[in-house]
Image (cartoon, grey):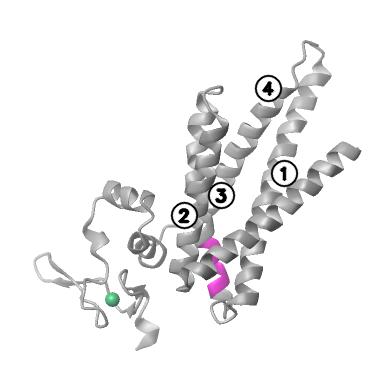
Amino acid sequence: MEANCVYRCIECSQLAGELYRDYNRGVLKLTICKSCHKPVDKYIEYDPVIILINAILCKAQVYRHILFNTTINIHGKLCIFCLLCEAYVRWLQLQGSTQTTDPEDIIRYAKEWDFYRMFGIACLEQSVYFLGIFAALYLMASGTLKTKLDFILLLKALLLSSYGKLLLIPAVIWEHDYTFVSLKLIKLFVLTSNFQAIRVTLNTSRKMSCMAICTGLILESIVVDSCKKMEWSM
Ligand SMILES: [Zn+2]
């Protein structure tokens, strides 16, 4: 029975075999959850815009809908795109801080190298942050990360829930119209979204999810600091 249960109820996370039943002549009926007696996934009837608004509001139900009941497969591309945006914003900030009037070609190559360096740092920070989250969950809530599938699902959830970084695009387009506060707000939104993704994917408590995020952040800041120290010593 369990093998056929590929979906999850968005309200109580109970496994379900189907989301709707297709009666003849196009009559569809939403499946009702056996555990909480609510529709297993009401969002299959909703407009994508409504789903997006609910995702922005960080509703656990919509996270379950996206992570368990859809076949969205854009996490890899989304991750690369977000990292490129992040690298570009950092590179712009770097350009702003080091102004030069020298027209030599060597400067252009140095600037290009700076962009790759920023991309590398952004990748490293992201990896360390995720590593911190996985380590914290593995050590403090070992029951939640049991199989390889749990790891993959959590990684996918973390990558997808980092979609808030797309808000960096306006910062990329209107080069000088971003502020320190808006970048911090984007970061806060991504963290909230990651928090909800962990909670929904592994069915953990708010406290555990929060601790995992904090561990990831601490580890990330340690790496950032050591990177900066290395740069100064070079
Ligand atoms: Zn239910």
Question: Answer yes or no: do the residues labelled 4 and 2 have beta carbons within 8 Å?
Answer: no
Identify the residue at horizontal 53%, vertical 28% (top origin): 178
The residue labelled by disc 4 is 96
Q: Report the quarter where the C terminus lies.
A: top right
Could you classify mark 1 by the number of other residues whose Cα lies within 10 Å: few (under 14), some (14-19), or many (20 or more)? some
What amino acid type is highlighted by mark number 3?
Cys
Q: Secondary structure at mark 2?
A: helix
Q: Is residue 104 visible?
A: yes
Q: Secondary structure at mark 3?
A: helix
Q: Is residue 74 visible?
A: no
Distance from disc 3 to disc 1, alpha carbons, whole Å, reads 13 Å
Distance from disc 3 to disc 4, alpha carbons, whole Å, reads 26 Å
What amino acid type is highlighted by mark number 2?
Ser
Q: Report the quarter where the N terminus lies.
A: bottom left
Above or below for 6 versus 72? below
Distance from disc 1 to disc 4, alpha carbons, whole Å, reads 20 Å
Please state if 50 lies on the left or on the right of 145 as rendered: left
Q: Secondary structure at mark 4?
A: helix
Identify the residue at horizontal 75%, vertical 38% (top origin): 117
For residue 61, which quarter of the picture? Answer: bottom left
The residue labelled by disc 3 is 79
The residue labelled by disc 1 is 120
Q: Secondary structure at mark 1?
A: helix
Query: x, y percentage for residue 23?
Result: 12, 72
Could you classify mark 2 by the number of other residues whose Cα lies within 10 Å: few (under 14), some (14-19), or many (20 or more)? many
Q: Dividing the image into four equal quarters, which quarter contains ligand 1?
A: bottom left
Query: x, y percentage for residue 188?
Result: 51, 47
